[in-house]
Image: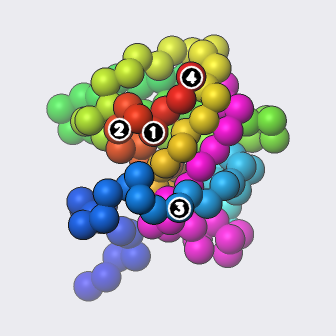
């Protein structure tokens, strides 16, 4: 039975060769949304700019690391860090750009940006 959630698998095409679609944190708010635009972003490679990190959670045995962030819209969004990401993020840190992230649906109307590698985060 299809539960409506997507599973992230390795792509045959490396992310640096895919064009990233620019979005705002307002498009994928932390508290969730029923907007069709957000749903249409599932699995899309996106780019976000001029970000501030609001909170960081270290990875556990059962969960990948995550962070809450916002851009100039001042709407908070969730980011997830794959095991390949080794950069250290901290609260209040400024990030110039997430150049390549994939939108992942994490619940009903809730979305996160999955960051797949250090090269995707520009300070």
- Identify whether 71 is placed above or below 17: above
Q: Which residue is mark 1?
A: 120
In front of the other: 44 or 37: 44
Local crowd size for mark 2, using a 10 Å CA cut-off: few (<14), some (14–19), many (≥20) = some
The alpha-carbon separation of the residues under discs 3 and 1 comes to 13 Å
Query: Is residue 77 within the magenta segment?
Result: no
The alpha-carbon separation of the residues under discs 2 and 4 comes to 14 Å
In front of the other: 39 or 82: 82
Question: Is residue 30 in view from this perspective?
Answer: no
- Which residue is depicted at the point 18% across and 32% down? 61
Q: Earlier in the sequence, mark 2 or mark 4?
A: 2
Query: What is the residue that sits farthest to the front in this orientation?
Result: 17
- Callouts 3 and 4 close, C-beta under 8 Å: no
- Callouts 1 and 2 close, C-beta under 8 Å: yes
Local crowd size for mark 1, using a 10 Å CA cut-off: few (<14), some (14–19), many (≥20) = some
Q: Count every numbered label the image shows and give the total.
A: 4
Q: Give residue 19's mark.
A: 3
The alpha-carbon separation of the residues under discs 1 and 4 comes to 10 Å
In magenta, the rendered stretch is 35-53
Q: Give residue 123's mark.
A: 4
- Which residue is depicted at the point 55% across and 57% down? 20
Front position among marks 3 and 2: 3
Res 3 quadrant in image: bottom left
Q: Which residue is mark 2?
A: 117
Query: Is residue 46 within the magenta segment?
Result: yes
């Amino acid at each position: 039975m299809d539960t409506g959630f997507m599973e992230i698998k390795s792509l045959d095409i490396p992310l640096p060769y895919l064009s990233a679609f620019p979005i705002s944190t307002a498009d994928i708010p932390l508290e969730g949304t029923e907007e069709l635009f957000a749903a249409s972003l599932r699995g899309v490679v996106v780019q976000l700019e001029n970000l501030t990190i609001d909170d960081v959670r270290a990875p556990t045995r059962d969960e990948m690391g995550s962070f809450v962030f916002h851009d100039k819209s001042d709407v908070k969004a969730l980011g997830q860090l794959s095991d390949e990401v080794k950069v250290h993020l901290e609260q209040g840190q400024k990030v110039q750009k997430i150049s390549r992230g994939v939108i992942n649906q994490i619940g009903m109307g809730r979305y996160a940006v999955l960051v797949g590698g250090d090269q995707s985060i520009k300070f």
